Image (cartoon, grey):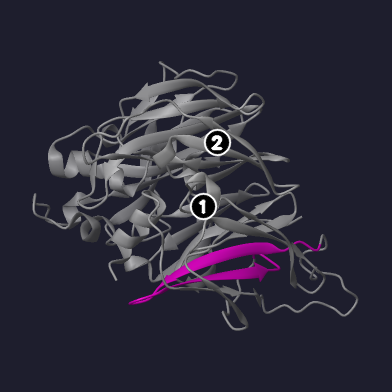
């Protein structure tokens, strides 16, 4: 199996995944007491931390959900599996666990009982709306009782209620036409940002057979009260596919790993980031960042806020590989030729983060209680190191997991 091609076509183009998906209810090595308290001595609040990992086999895919009881160093065990078909996907919303199907556009909601048992709490199908997946690279929670499933092929958004698990209607997105072989795509799980009654969703165009991407993008501004697109903001950056918000409410958008292809292989535009200021629905004309200007001429991806006015950036060190027009783009960009840098968002200066070595570029991260948990993939996404990353650039290892870790939540 070509891991990169399959993974990207599944996420960005919405191709239905195949294979077997396993849901493993693997608890951490710290056990729960018989009193029914779901906590442990290090976590008096009794929180669980659901996390998932996608394991790519030769002819199949497996996904594992672990209910951790601490963010401290631990061993991750995938025993005690519960099996699903296809590539499932995990999200946590309002204290409930949502798991999407891999072979059908549907999801199941669960509650977590004492002792970590998952109990099914409802199910919803989107089969009648032209969707090929309900995964969270298409689904966005816009509020406690509102969520949106994007169906790019239909240029439509399905509105549903995560409390009642009912669909209330649909609304259209602007007629953003496909560009020859490049089709409209979005990857909501890492790019969409909810701020107040607004949802900001970047979109771009791409052909995932040969990783040919548009040289520009757009950002949809959606009113989550009236369910309508208020604006479509054009952006002269390729592959806007990552969104992050700082403590002031400023939103930054940047590209994913494959957004470096126009510059590296086609003589196209450099990768870059843009900003929408707090309280505004227009681009900030006073702030943009071309990554090559601050990384010694290198392309980069996935700008994410980490606190203290700083962001993390994954930088492609092209001096480590011989690039030609015939280079396999997936193989080149999924190889460990990437390193982390930190960016000062005010001065727009950057420097290498020395605490982490080479990685495969496509990292995910999450902030839990102001802690930056970072998931660093190995070559071909065979395993992931979970580390805690600090704004000063220092790193502390937490655990290692088989496969590609993309999800971690605090379940209150």
Q: CA distance from mark 2 to mark 1?
A: 15 Å
Q: Which residue is disc 2 drawn over?
A: 193
Within 10 Å of disc 2 (Cα), the crowding (few <14, some 14-19, many 20+) is many
Q: Secondary structure at mark 1?
A: strand
Q: Position of residue 37 (x, y in %)?
A: 86, 70
| Residue located 73% across and 40% down the image | 145
Screen quadrant of the N terminus: bottom left
Residue 72: x percent and y percent? 64, 67
Please check the rendered image and state whether residue 68 is part of the magenta-colored stretch, yes or no: yes
Dominant SS of magenta comes to strand
From the image, tell me which residue sits under label 1: 365
Q: Is residue 261 visible?
A: yes
Residue located 61% across and 57% down the image: 107
Is residue 173 toward the left or the right of residue 167 in the image? Answer: left
Give left or right: position of 30 versus 285.
right
Q: Is residue 347 visible?
A: no
Indicate the quadrant where residue 264 lies.
top left
Q: Which residues are magenta?
A: 46-71
Q: Earlier in the sequence, mark 2 or mark 1?
A: 2
Q: Which mark is residue 72?
A: none
Q: Please tell me whether residue 164 is drawn above or below residue 309 in the rendered image.
A: below
């Amino acid at each position: 199996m070509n891991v990169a091609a399959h993974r990207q076509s599944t996420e960005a183009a919405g191709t239905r995944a195949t294979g077997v998906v396993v849901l493993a209810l693997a608890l951490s090595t710290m056990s729960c007491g018989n009193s029914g308290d779901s906590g442990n001595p290090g976590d008096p609040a009794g929180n669980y931390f659901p996390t998932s990992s996608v394991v790519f086999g030769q002819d199949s895919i497996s996904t594992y959900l672990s209910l951790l009881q601490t963010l401290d160093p631990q061993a991750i065990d995938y025993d005690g599996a519960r099996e699903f078909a296809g590539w499932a996907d995990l999200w946590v919303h309002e204290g409930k666990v949502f798991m999407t199907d891999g072979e059908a556009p549907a999801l199941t909601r669960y509650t977590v009982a004492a002792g970590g048992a998952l109990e099914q709490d409802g199910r919803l199908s989107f089969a009648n709306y032209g969707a090929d997946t309900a995964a969270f690279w298409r689904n966005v929670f816009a509020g406690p009782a509102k969520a949106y499933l994007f169906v790019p092929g239909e240029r439509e958004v399905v509105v549903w209620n995560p409390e009642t698990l009912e669909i209330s209607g649909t609304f259209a997105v602007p007629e953003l036409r496909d560009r020859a072989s490049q089709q409209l795509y979005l990857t909501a799980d890492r790019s969409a940002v909810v701020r107040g009654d607004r949802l900001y969703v970047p979109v771009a165009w791409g052909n995932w057979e040969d990783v040919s991407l548009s040289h520009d993008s757009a950002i949809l501004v959606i009113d989550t009260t009236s369910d309508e697109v208020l604006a479509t903001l054009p952006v002269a950056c390729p592959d806007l596919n990552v969104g992050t918000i700082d403590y002031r409410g400023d939103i930054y958008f940047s590209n994913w790993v494959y957004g470096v292809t126009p510059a590296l292989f086609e003589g196209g535009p450099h990768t870059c980031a843009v900003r929408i200021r707090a309280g505004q629905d227009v681009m900030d004309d006073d702030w943009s960042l071309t990554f090559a200007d601050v990384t010694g001429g290198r392309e980069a991806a996935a700008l994410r806020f980490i606190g203290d006015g700083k962001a993390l950036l994954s930088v492609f060190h092209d001096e480590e590989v011989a690039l030609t027009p015939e280079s396999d783009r997936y193989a080149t960009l999924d190889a460990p030729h990437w390193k982390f840098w930190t960016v000062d968002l005010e001065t727009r200066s950057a420097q290498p983060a020395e605490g982490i070595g080479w990685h495969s570029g496509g990292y995910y991260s999450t902030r839990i209680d102001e802690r930056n948990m970072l998931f660093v993939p190995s070559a071909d996404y065979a395993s992931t190191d979970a580390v805690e990353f600090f704004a000063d650039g220092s790193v502390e290892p937490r655990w290692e997991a088989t496969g590609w870790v993309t999800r971690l939540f605090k379940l209150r």
